[in-house]
Amino acid sequence: MAVQISDDEGRTWKWKRHLEFDEPGPEAGSFHYPSIIQAKDGTLHASYSYHFKVLPGDANTKAAKTIKHAHFNVEWVRGE
C-alpha cells in the first residue's frame, strides 16, 4: 500500500512512500478500499482495510481483518 504525490496534475508521480509492504508469498497480507483526506492543517489521513493470512495452527483466526489509519504529512511522502 503506497501513497504517491504528483505536482503536475497527475501526469507524473515523483514521490512515493509505502504505508505497508509485504513481500510476495503465502504469508503476505492484502490491502483494500483505501481512502485519503487532507485535514485543515495540511496533514493527510489514510484509512484502508488490511487482511492478513492466518497461518495453520494460529489461534487468532478472528483477527484476520482490520481497518488501519495512517496520519502523516506531505514532507514524509517526499522524504524531506
Image: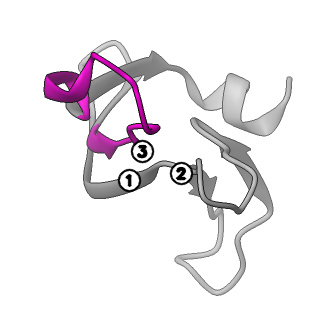
CA gap between label 3 and label 1 equals: 12 Å
Tell me which corner region of the image, top left, top right, bottom left or bottom right, holds residue 60.
top left
Mark number for residue 53?
3
Q: Which residue is mark 2?
A: 1
Q: Is residue 75 magenta?
A: no
Q: What amino acid type is highlighted by mark number 3?
A: Lys
Horizontal placement of 32 versus 26: left or right? left
Q: Residue at x 55, y 22 (%)?
A: 73
Q: Earlier in the sequence, mark 2 or mark 1?
A: 2
CA gap between label 2 and label 1 equals: 7 Å
Horizontal placement of 68 versus 19: left or right? left
Q: Can the viewer see residue 58?
A: yes
Tell me which corner region of the image, top left, top right, bottom left or bottom right, holds residue 38.
top left
Q: Earlier in the sequence, mark 3 or mark 2?
A: 2
Percent coordinates x, y for residue 49 in the rendering: 24, 43
For the view shown, which residue lies furthest in the right direction? 80
CB within 8 Å, label 3 to label 1 = no
Q: What amino acid type is highlighted by mark number 2?
A: Met
Q: What residue span does the magenta drawing correspond to?
A: 48-64
Mark number for residue 31?
1
Q: Residue at x 72, y 80 (%)?
A: 12
Q: Nearer the viewer, mark 3 or mark 2?
A: 3
Q: What amino acid type is highlighted by mark number 1?
A: Phe
For the view shown, which residue lies furthest in the bottom direction? 11
Q: Earlier in the sequence, mark 3 or mark 1?
A: 1
Q: Is residue 63 magenta?
A: yes
